[in-house]
Amino acid sequence: MEQVKAQSAPRHLGKLFMILSAFLTATGQLFWKWGHANLVYMGIGFVCYGLGAILMIKSFSLEKLSVAYPLMCISYIVALFYGEFFLDEPLTLKKLAAVALLGIGVTLTSYEK
């Protein structure tokens, strides 16, 4: 029997979907934080989080798990900066060092030649 090959997606599409998922997930969580007193914000948070989940699932279908999943760490980085800019949470040197380590780890695990 002849196997039918699926159309191959552009090379980095799975990674792009996971990065977008990380941003949407962090954005959804920010809206949930605001949403404790506002149901509209809570709804926006669920929409962002849901879209992020859909993109994550699509990413898993296009990319190796060991490459795609570490990119979700970007959501931690985004959430840290959301806290600084939108919630007046302090951005300390310790937190910046952690972000640098996360960024290095994500780059090393997701980069393939």
Image (tube, rainbow, N blue to C red):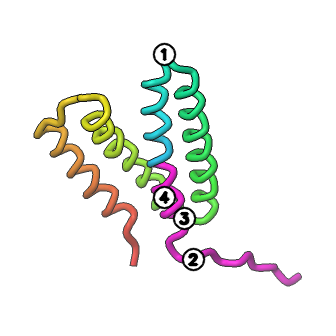
Label 4 with label 3: CB-CB less than 8 Å: yes
Q: Residue furthest top?
A: 37
Instruction: Identify the magenta region.
Output: 1-22
Q: CA distance from mark 1 to mark 2?
A: 42 Å
Which amino acid lies under the numbered mark 1 shown in the image of this protein?
A: Ala
**In the figure, is residue 64 to the left or right of 113?**
right
- The amino acid on which the numbered mark 3 sits, given as a three-letter code, is Gly
The dot on residue 68 is 4
Report, in whole angstroms, how far the alpha carbon at label 4 lies from the one at label 2. Answer: 15 Å
Which amino acid is tagged 4? Ala
Q: Nearer the viewer, mark 4 or mark 3?
A: 3
Q: For residue 26, what is the image quadrant?
A: top left
Q: Residue at x 47, y 58 (%)?
A: 66
Depth-wise, is mark 1 or mark 3 nearer the camera? Answer: 1
Name which of mark 4 and mark 2 comes first in the sequence.
2
Name the mark on residue 10.
2
The residue that label 3 is drawn on is 14
Name the element at disc 1. loop
The numbered mark, 1 or 3, whose residue comes first in the sequence reads: 3
For residue 5, side relative to residue 47 (left or right)? right
Q: Earlier in the sequence, mark 1 or mark 4?
A: 1
Q: Residue at x 39, y 63 (%)?
A: 110
Q: CA distance from mark 1 to mark 4?
A: 35 Å
Where is mark 1, residue-wise?
37
Q: Residue furthest right?
A: 1
Dot 2, how many residues are within 10 Å of its Cα: few (below 14), some (14-19), or many (20+)? few
Label 2, label 3: how many angstroms apart (C-alpha)? 8 Å
